[in-house]
Image (cartoon, helix red, strand yellow):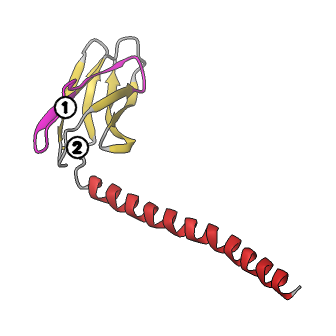
């Protein structure tokens, strides 16, 4: 009877230890994977703009205006602009289609067409998605339409 009890206790201990051992191995692998990912962050692109906002000042309805935002890849891997959104159809954006190499610069050209817009102040948003950040980078153009 005693031997059955001891065998049962040993099986129970072995049963409890098996998941702990597997969990420890997974944790060690997870820590190893996290270390690998941390190393790969060092080889990442960066995106830095000369400014985030441009003010056109006072404009008239019949004047189409553009501004070039200069971006720099301040990272260590090629920067790729994946998508560009503007807040309205009156604002268009031209961006580089080719990767921007580390240390290089490129231009994002934002064009505002005030045709059909009412007089007054405006602010237009441009969002830029890239492989440098999980959130879009925001650029703004603003001004005042005069009659």
Residue 51, disc: 2
Q: CA distance from mark 2 to mark 1?
A: 21 Å
Q: Quadrant of residue 110?
A: top left
Magenta-highlighted residues: 86-108
Q: Look at the picture and state if 77 lies above or below 142.
A: below
The stretch drawn in magenta includes residue 94: yes
In-image side of 116 versus 27 (left or right): left
Q: Is residue 108 above or below residue 63?
A: below
Position of residue 141 in the picture relative to residue 13 (left or right)? left
Residue plotted at (22% across, 50% down): 43
Q: Which residue is mark 1?
A: 99
Which badge, 2 or 1, is on the more N-terminal residue?
A: 2
Other residues around mark 2 within 10 Å, as few (<14) / some (14–19) / many (≥20): few
Count of numbered circles in the view = 2
Q: Residue at x 28, y 40 (%)?
A: 53
- Seen at 22% across and 38% down, the residue is 79
Q: Hey, which quadrant is residue 89 in on the image?
A: top left
Residue 7, quarter of picture: bottom right
- The one of 96 and 79 positioned closer to us in this rendering: 79
Image depth: mark 2 or mark 1 in front: 1
Query: Which residue reaches farthest bottom?
Result: 2
Q: Which corner quadrant holds the C terminus?
A: top left
Q: Are marks 2 and 1 in contact (CB under 8 Å)?
A: no
Is label 1 in a helix, a strand or a loop?
loop
How would you rate the neighbour count of disc 1 (Cα within 10 Å): few for under 14, some for 14-19, many for 20 or more? Answer: some
Quadrant that contains the N terminus: bottom right
Q: Position of residue 66 (x, y in %)?
A: 21, 23
């Amino acid at each position: 009877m005693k031997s059955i009890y001891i065998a049962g206790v040993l099986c129970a201990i072995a049963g409890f230890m098996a998941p702990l051992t597997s969990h420890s191995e997974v944790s060690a692998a997870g820590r190893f994977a996290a270390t690998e990912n941390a190393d790969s962050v060092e080889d990442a692109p960066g995106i830095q703009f000369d400014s985030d906002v441009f003010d056109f000042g006072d404009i008239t309805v019949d004047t189409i205006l553009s501004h070039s935002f200069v971006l720099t890849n301040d990272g260590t891997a090629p920067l790729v602009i994946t998508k560009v959104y503007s807040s309205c159809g009156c604002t268009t954006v031209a961006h580089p289609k080719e990767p921007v190499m580390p240390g290089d610069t490129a231009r994002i050209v934002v064009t505002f067409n005030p045709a059909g817009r009412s007089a007054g102040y405006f602010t237009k948003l441009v969002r830029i998605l890239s492989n440098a950040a999980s959130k879009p980078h925001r650029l703004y153009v603003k001004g005042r339409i005069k009659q």
